[in-house]
Image (cartoon, coloured by chain):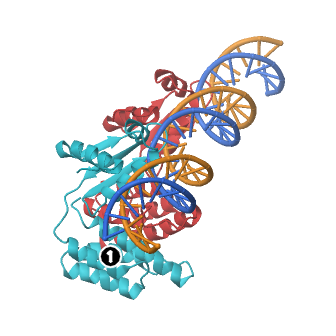
Chain colours: A red, B cyan, C blue, D orange
Amino acid sequence: MENQNISDIIESYLKQILADSQQVEIRRAEIANQFNVVPSQINYVIKTRFTIQDGYVVESKRGGGGYIRIEKVKLLDNLDFIDSLVTAVGDQITRHDGLAVIRSLFEAGAINRRESNIILAAIDKTAINTGNVEVDERLRAQILISILNHLRYES
Amino acid sequence: MENQNISDIIESYLKQILADSQQVEIRRAEIANQFNVVPSQINYVIKTRFTIQDGYVVESKRGGGGYIRIEKVKLLDNLDFIDSLVTAVGDQITRHDGLAVIRSLFEAGAINRRESNIILAAIDKTAINTGNVEVDERLRAQILISILNHLRYES
DNA sequence: ATAATATTAGTCAACATTAGTCAAGAAACT
DNA sequence: AGTTTCTTGACTAATGTTGACTAATATTAT
C-alpha cells in the first residue's frame, strides 16, 4: 500500500471509472501526461491488467481523434461462459492469466471463494514448477481446462 | 533467549508487528538493511519461521513497488489429519492413491462433493498426462500437497 | 484525387528495480 | 566428530519504466 508502483495506480484509476460505467475511453497521451509517464506505459498497463482473462476487451484507433477504449465484457451473459474461458486459457497459460480466469469464474458466481482457493492451489507455483516455464504453462492450461469441463456438468 | 541469532531477532521483529495486525508488508532490501544482513536472509527467516504449519501465508511481488507480505491465517482443527495425508502423498502418487486421498478428505468432512470433483479434475488423466508416468506422479503429488496445505486454514 | 504532413497509438528492446534460489562455508549444537 | 542451523553472496527470475522507432488514420495542400 505504501509504495505502489505507477502501473498499479493507473490500473486503479481506470478500474475506478469502470466501476461506475461499462467502458472507459482515453487518449493515451493525455493519461500518460496526467500520471507523468511515457505513453507506452499505458500500453503496458493495459496489456498486463486489462486482458480478456480479466474480462476486458480493448479497442483503439490511431490518428487524429484517436483513442483507447476499454470495455468490460459480461462473460456471464454469454451462454457458453465456460467455453469462452476454455478459449481464453488456450493450450498454455501464465499463472497471472490463470488467476484471472479463476477470478472470472468467481465473479460470475460459478464457484465460491473456497473453490477458488482450491483451484488456485492446484495451479500455484508450489504445485506447478517443473523448471521449464513453457511446460508449466501447458500443465496449468490442462488442469484449468479439466476443471472447467467438470464445472460445465456440475453447475 | 540468551544467545539469539539474527534470524531469531528478525523473526521476533516481524511477529511483534503481527501481534497487533493481521499482516505485515515489507520491502526485503529495507529489512535486510535495517538488520544488516544480506537480502536472502529474509527469505531464510520466512522459509523457516513463517510456514503454513505455523499459520502464516506469504505472498510477494518483484519489480518496482515489490513487496513481501506475511499474513496470519486461522488454522483449522484438522491439522494432524492433513499432515498424515501430506505424508501419505509423499513426493509422488498414482491416480488411484490420489483418489483415495480425496476420498479420505471427503469422508472426514474436510471437503464436500463438489470440491472433491474439482480436485479430482485437477489430478485426472485429462489434466496430468505428460507421457511420463513418473513425472505425472510427481506433479500429482505436488498439486495435492498444495491443495492440502490450503485446506489447513480458513479462507 | 493524390500527396504531403500532422496526429494519434503500437511494438520492442534496453534498462531499472525489486524478490527467489541455491550452494558453499561458518557457527552452534548434539 | 558429526549434524543441523545460520549466514553469505553469486546468479536467476519477475515486474516495471523508458524511449526510439513503426504503423495507422486524419487533415491539409496541390
Residue A62 is left or right of residue B71, and the answer is right
Residue in the image at 16% along x and 69% along y: B77
Q: Position of residue B33 (x, y in %)?
A: 42, 37
Question: How would you rate the neighbour count of disc 1 (Cα within 10 Å): few for under 14, some for 14-19, many for 20 or more?
Answer: many
| Image position, residue D25 (x, y; %) | 64, 31
Q: How many marks?
A: 1
Q: Position of residue B38 (x, y in %)?
A: 46, 44
The amino acid marked with disc number 1 is Val
- Above or below residue A114? Residue B32 is above
A4 relative position to A20: left or right: right
- In this rendering, position of residue B127 left or right of residue B49: right
Instruction: Depth check: give the residue in front, C15 or B109.
Output: C15
Camera-nearest residue between C3 and B137? B137
Q: Is residue A128 visible?
A: yes
Q: Can I make out residue A153 in this image?
A: no
Q: Residue at x 40, y 68 (%)?
A: A148
- Check disc 1 and report the residue beneath it: B86
Which quarter of the rendering shows the C terminus of chain B? bottom left
The percent position of residue A146, horizontal first and vertical second, equals 43, 72
